[in-house]
Amino acid sequence: MHLSSTTAAAAVCFLAATAVHAIPHYPRTQGDNSIKWTPCKLGNTTVPMECGSLTVPLDYTDKTSNATLQLQLQRAPAKKPCKDTKSILLNFGGPGADGILDFVYFSERMQAATGGGHHLINLVPRGTNTTLPFSCYQNDLLRNSNQPLAGNASNVALGFVWERAAFVGVDCKAAQNKTGSLIGTAFVARDMMRVVDALGEDGMLRYWGVSYGTILGATAVAMFPDRVDKILLDGVVNPFEYYENKETELFTDSDAAFRGFMKGCLANPELCPLAKNQTLSQLEDSIYSLFERLKSKPIGMSIPGYPGGGIMIDYSLVTSIVYRQLYTPFIWQTTAKCLNGLLSGNKTDAQRCLGGLDAPPANVRADQEALQGIKCGDNRVHTANLTDMLPVFEGRHQKSRYFGSSADIVPATCAQWTMPAKERYMGDFNVTPRKPVLVIGNTYDPITPLVSARNVSETFKGSVLLQHDAYGHDSLMQASLCTAKAIRSYFSNGIMPEQGTKCGNEVALFSSEDGWDNVIKQLEESS
């Protein structure tokens, strides 16, 4: 998702080599298989945190095995606990994100939005952090041997992407042949239900899933419809396309989101060096001309100690970085400075595009390829023939001229993957859950468009779609008092918003704010 990874993050993963998130001591599961919570320190948050663990089967499909897995859990206790306080499980997306950084960053916001009367729990999914970490390479020199390549970077790029993707699949199978098939979404859904049981509450699932977390949530609803209490799907991925490896819908609103970036720039020239008294059409032309120019005239950036001695700022890299930054409107001033540096030819300013990239740290994450391991393992459709996948690539590129190709390596890898998850969800999503599902979609979400939220809301019987009229990826990126109150009413009282509800937001573009400080204050005043 936001601070971690999403589908698009695959295109810039070599920029994201970060140390493993420090995990405190986790008390082992008690003999009765309940969860023992102990205070722990996570990041710099002022929200009190607790950590725990739970033992679950390693392989749910092998009924003869006694092998187990220790799940890691983090909890923000309810601010307003009562005798029968319930818990809300969270997933912040990916796939391949452990959720810890996001949990630390968003926990106060989510406590306010849910009313403060629930415990919030982050479950570290399989394949991430130290829970069966999925990595295909022994070091970053091997991992970074090829910069990401957009499928439309040249007339031969897509063929290169396809063949390179086959290498990735072979490398991953060789490195992960023992446990690589045990990290699929269906297993994580079962892990969640084991957590629900161990909590000793009422046996019902309460859940807030964001981005890929909506795939996990939708899968859990479809697998366990009779155990649904309150499910919020926020920033929705189309589950039909996800499991069939036909994800074209993702890019429906990408260009509209980028146009919003440019409009916000022109409306705030004192904050956006790109403005320069240009019209929207002129600004579009200058940026799009830059993208095209970088296809044949990349900018070399020397970085001592970095694999290969530096990095090539080319079409594939820049479009991937800009696209990823559309997720988070509060950093759009940085995006503008990056693009302005490239347009002006100022290498110092252009370095803003790299986010302070230095040599990779010594202790890199052990789950670098978790996205591929989870997503590709979930995939139902495989082919070794590029021709079979051309409609998917063409559909992505047609949805967004410059951003639709930024992560072509992902569907290319999944199509040729030969290590399927032990359990893949093979059903549909035409189910009637015990309680209705709340679905939220942003008007200008660059990666999970409103149409995907609408499609899912029309599938789960009784669900309601709330339109969050904002930019960025999911409702957390630009706060809305209207949206937050709807979420609070849902989790606190089970009250759904009216079908067709559209909530505005209070955040100005290029403000470097997400608006949550004001919304939290207003929520406290109205509680």
Image (cartoon, rainbow, N blue to C red):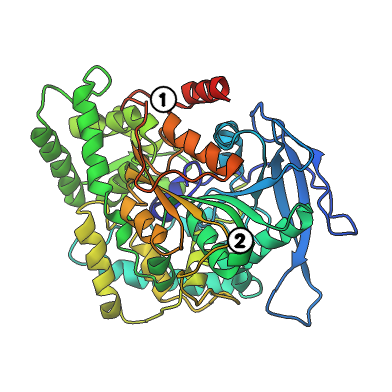
> Image point 33% across, 51% down: which residue?
450
What's the distance in space between the residues labelled 1 and 2, CA to CA? Answer: 33 Å
> Image point 24% across, 65% down: which residue?
395
In primary-sequence order, the first of circles 1 and 2 is: 2
The amino acid type found where label 2 is placed reads Gly
Is 267 drawn above or below residue 373 in the view shown?
A: above
The amino acid type found where label 1 is placed reads Glu
> Is label 2 in a helix, a strand or a loop?
loop
The image's mark for residue 127 is 2
> Image point 48% across, 46% down: which residue?
496
Is 510 drawn above or below residue 438 in the view shown?
A: above
> Image point 61% across, 75% down: which residue?
177
Q: Nearer the viewer, mark 1 or mark 2?
A: 1
Is 250 drawn above or below residue 101 in the view shown?
A: below
Position in image of residue 462 (x %, y %): 46, 58
> Is label 1 in a helix, a strand or a loop?
loop
Task: Tell me the quadrant of the picture where the C terminus can be found.
Answer: top right
Tally of numbered discs: 2
- Confirm whether residue 369 shows in the render: no
The image's mark for residue 513 is 1
Position in image of residue 482 (x %, y %): 42, 32
**Residue reaching furthest right?**
31
Is 201 drawn above or below residue 177 in the view shown?
A: above
**Residue reaching furthest top?**
270
Describe residue 343's horizontal placement relative to residue 417 as left or right: left
- Confirm whether residue 423 shows in the render: yes
Residue in the foreground of this view, choosing between 19 and 255: 255
Position in image of residue 487 (x %, y %): 51, 40
Would you call the spot at circle 2 few (<14 residues within 10 Å), some (14-19), or many (20 or more)? many
Describe residue 499's horizontal placement relative to residue 34 as left or right: left
Residue in the foreground of this view, choosing between 97 and 423: 423
The image's mark for residue 473 is none
